[in-house]
């Protein structure tokens, strides 16, 4: 997503929010994200905030409300007045997956939120680090068979879609893998590059720069087609894992 696409999305956002008479009252819009600064959700939120300022003439700031795999951010926006002063930018998980995962969820996606616009889409990546002596999926799966307690992976939080991508991958690989939850994908990437975990599941964009620098290796992506960001990297299905998981981000209003 670039600034041109961000402006187009925010034009749609403006049409949706402009229908609310109270929108003109707050001077500032806070775009709330549930993950730590430095990750793809945070970067996307800053594009949206910039486009809100450019396209609608509003002061917009990004607020990182980390914790509980993004649920704290959702709860914060739910409790805010429906006047345009606070918006939620989130991947699809909190609205589509979490109601089926958590026994006690303190929000109802259909009752408590208005979906405004989808702003970006992409793929997840399965990425290995220097702990793994392999450079492709075949080698990684062979290493997993003898890795023992080193067979682990990081995700941006327990209950997130990347968490379950790792679960499904481990089942198909026939190897138990320990899940290590973080407060965002950027944090898991730091530990992956440092050799503290074997694999991370994250949006492709989270791993891209480290992959290009040779510090980590993206061994597969989760889309139906190969990602245009990483030439030559197969999809999970091409690598022999029957799994396809798209990724998208959207803006929601209380």
Image (tube, helix red, strand yellow):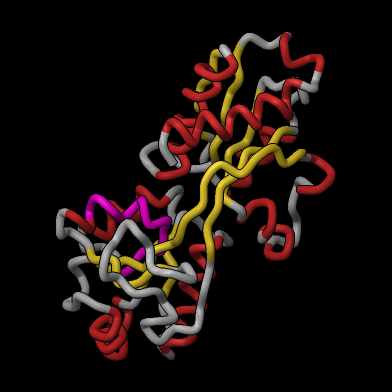
Instruction: Tell me if residue 247 can be seen.
Output: yes
Q: How many marks?
A: 0
Looking at this view, is 25 or 157 the one in front?
A: 25
In the picture provided, is 236 more to the left or to the right than 246? left
In the rendered view of the protein, which quadrant contains the N terminus? Answer: top left
Instruction: Tell me if residue 198 can be seen.
Output: no
User: At which x and y percent is residue 56?
Assistant: 59, 16
State the residue at coordinates (69%, 52%).
95
In the picture provided, is 173 more to the left or to the right than 29? left
Q: Report which quarter residue 235 is drawn in.
A: bottom left
Residue that protrudes farthest toward the right in the picture: 111
Taking the magenta stretch, the answer to whether it contains residue 20 is no
In the picture provided, is 73 more to the left or to the right than 189? right
Looking at this view, is 224 or 202 the one in front?
A: 224
State the residue at coordinates (72%, 25%).
17
Q: Name above or below for residue 187 compared with residue 246.
A: above
State the residue at coordinates (61%, 44%).
118
Taking the magenta stretch, the answer to whether it contains residue 201 is yes
Looking at this view, is 82 or 58 the one in front?
A: 58
State the residue at coordinates (73%, 16%).
23
User: At which x and y percent is residue 200?
Assistant: 36, 64
User: At which x and y percent is residue 126?
Assistant: 37, 68
The magenta region covers 199-210
Q: Name above or below for residue 19 compared with residue 1.
A: above
In the picture provided, is 209 more to the left or to the right than 74? left
User: At which x and y percent is residue 7?
Assistant: 52, 28
Q: Name above or below for residue 225 compared with residue 38.
A: below
Q: Report which quarter residue 254 is drawn in.
A: top right
């Amino acid at each position: 997503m670039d600034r041109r696409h961000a402006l187009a999305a925010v034009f749609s956002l403006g049409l949706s929010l402009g229908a609310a008479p109270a929108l003109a009252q707050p001077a500032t819009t806070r775009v709330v994200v549930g993950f730590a600064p430095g990750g793809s959700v945070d970067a996307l939120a800053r594009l949206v905030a910039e486009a809100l300022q450019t396209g609608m003439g509003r002061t917009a700031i990004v607020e990182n409300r980390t914790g509980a795999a993004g649920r704290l951010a959702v709860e914060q926006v739910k409790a805010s007045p429906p006047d345009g002063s606070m918006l939620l930018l989130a991947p699809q998980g909190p609205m589509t997956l979490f109601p089926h995962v958590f026994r006690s969820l303190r929000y109802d996606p259909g009752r408590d939120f208005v979906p405004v616009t989808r702003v970006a889409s992409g793929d997840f990546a399965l990425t290995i680090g220097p702990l793994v002596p392999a450079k492709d999926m075949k080698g990684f799966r062979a290493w997993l068979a003898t890795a023992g307690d080193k067979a682990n992976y990081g995700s941006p939080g327990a209950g997130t879609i990347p968490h379950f991508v790792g679960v499904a991958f481990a089942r198909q690989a026939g190897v138990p893998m320990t899940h290590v939850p973080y407060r965002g994908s950027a944090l898991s990437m730091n530990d992956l590059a440092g050799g503290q975990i074997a694999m991370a599941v994250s949006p492709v964009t989270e791993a891209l720069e480290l992959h290009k620098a040779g510090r980590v290796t993206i061994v597969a992506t989760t889309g139906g087609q190969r990602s245009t960001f990483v030439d030559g990297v197969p999809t999970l299905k091409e690598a022999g894992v029957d799994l396809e998981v798209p990724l998208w981000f959207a803006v929601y209003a209380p």
